[in-house]
Image (cartoon, rainbow, N blue to C red):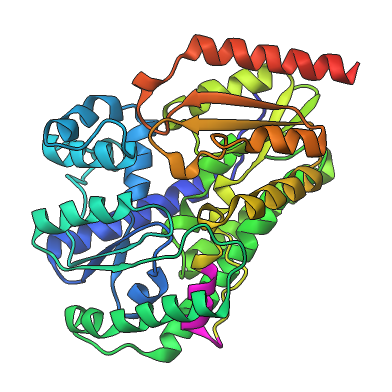
Amino acid sequence: MAERLKTTKDISKFMADYYYELDEASKSGKRKIAWCTSVGPAEILRSLGFLTYFPETHAAMLGTSRMAANLISSANAIGYSPDICSYLTADIGSCLQGLTPLTKAFPGIEGVPRADVLVYNTNQCRDVQDWFSWHAKRLNAPLLGLETHRNIAKVSAAHVSSIAAQMENMVEPLEHIAGRKLDLDELKNRVALTRQCSDLWEKCLQTAAATPSPLTFFDATTIMGPAVAGRGTRAAIDVYRLLLEELNERIEKGEGAIEGEERHRLYWDGMPVWGRLSMHSKLFAGLGASVIASTYCSSWIFNAMDPARPFESMAKAYTELFIVRSDDYKEKYIREKLEFFKCDGIIYHDSKTCPNNSNCRYGMPQRLQLETGIPALIINGDLNDLRLISDEQTKTNVEAFIEQLEEAKA
């Protein structure tokens, strides 16, 4: 394998500092903690002094640590279907069994942080509402939520104003829990920090347009933590400046992310298979294929963020999210990415328990292949439940797909 990014150490330290700060606050009770969905209004929470915990990052850790499959059955036993989000079922199962990967990853941490309030945004899916509702009842903590529009072709003023109003209505109950008033200047500052982080993260991902690409999709999934958990903080900006500098150095030296020749450049649509990141990375790289870009990792790029208009710009940014858009919009978006990154193939992950992030069930791969001439492969799997994955079938299908690309190249 190619040399690992040096900045990975800085990002690991960022995540360790993040979790240790949450743990100290949870144990001491000196600071309030808000649980937030990964594309929820973190800027408002941080402006009110909350430390912010994202259960989706914990659920992804349950996947990468391969703990999830042994925990999901506990959630199934209390009525949560095996067909719904395996982030949800793994995280609830983790709570029921009292097991978390945080204890191994960060010595001294005994469990997930407590919650003074839980805040969700359904721009990802309705599952987050049910997920947070379960925890709110368990913890006897207040629950607040944003109800986002779905299947949006063009984000309109009406969409933005309705979400902005919901955000503004959250402020008073959050102020009561925080024990302080919202400082509008602090909110503007947090929005500005999010925008800076977003812009840097976008530039990092865009370096993959170089040939050879200095990073892969699999790399990006392991270094995206600050873009999710660090939105609205200076520390996230600092670490991505270092990352961007290192990626540009790789480009100047002509160093690719995979060892050997980059014969094929692929785009990944859908969720990662968290428990198979290393396996999939090695599989593609061993075939001379670099999976250089993805829809998923770009989910934390918020070009609409504007500190001059904090509520409206947050509403617009969180409503522009790819997952809530119409198929016509999604197809145009992917076409543009295939061209920008000079991809000669696309992988769709049909994640069994994540239909909202699986874009291959209603003919999109076939339509895009007809329009672009770029061949596609659908991989059946799941984000967390490894019982739904056939490694041998995946390997066979990927090898056949790369052989098809080789024949086309010849």
From the top left corner, tell me how far across and down residue 230 is, in percent. Answer: 44, 61
Q: Position of 273 compared to 243: left or right?
A: left
Image quadrant for the N terminus?
top right
Residue 97 visible in this rendered orientation of the protein: yes
Magenta span: predominant SS is helix
Range shown magenta: 308-317
Q: Residue at x 54, y 69 (%)?
A: 317
Q: Residue at x 28, y 72 (%)?
A: 50
Vertical side of 115 occupied by 314: above or below: below
Residue most extreme to the right: 410
- Given residues 280 and 153, the one toward you in this image is 153
Image quadrant for the C terminus?
top right
Q: Residue at x 73, y 38 (%)?
A: 368
- Given residues 76 and 200, the one toward you in this image is 76
Q: Residue at x 56, y 48 (%)?
A: 297
Q: Position of 405 compared to 76: left or right?
A: right
From the top left corner, tell me how far across and down residue 231 is, in percent. Answer: 46, 65
From the top left corner, tell me how far across and down residue 91 is, in percent. Answer: 25, 41
Q: Using the rendered view, name the quadrant where residue 156 is placed.
A: bottom right
Residue 287 visible in this rendered orientation of the protein: no
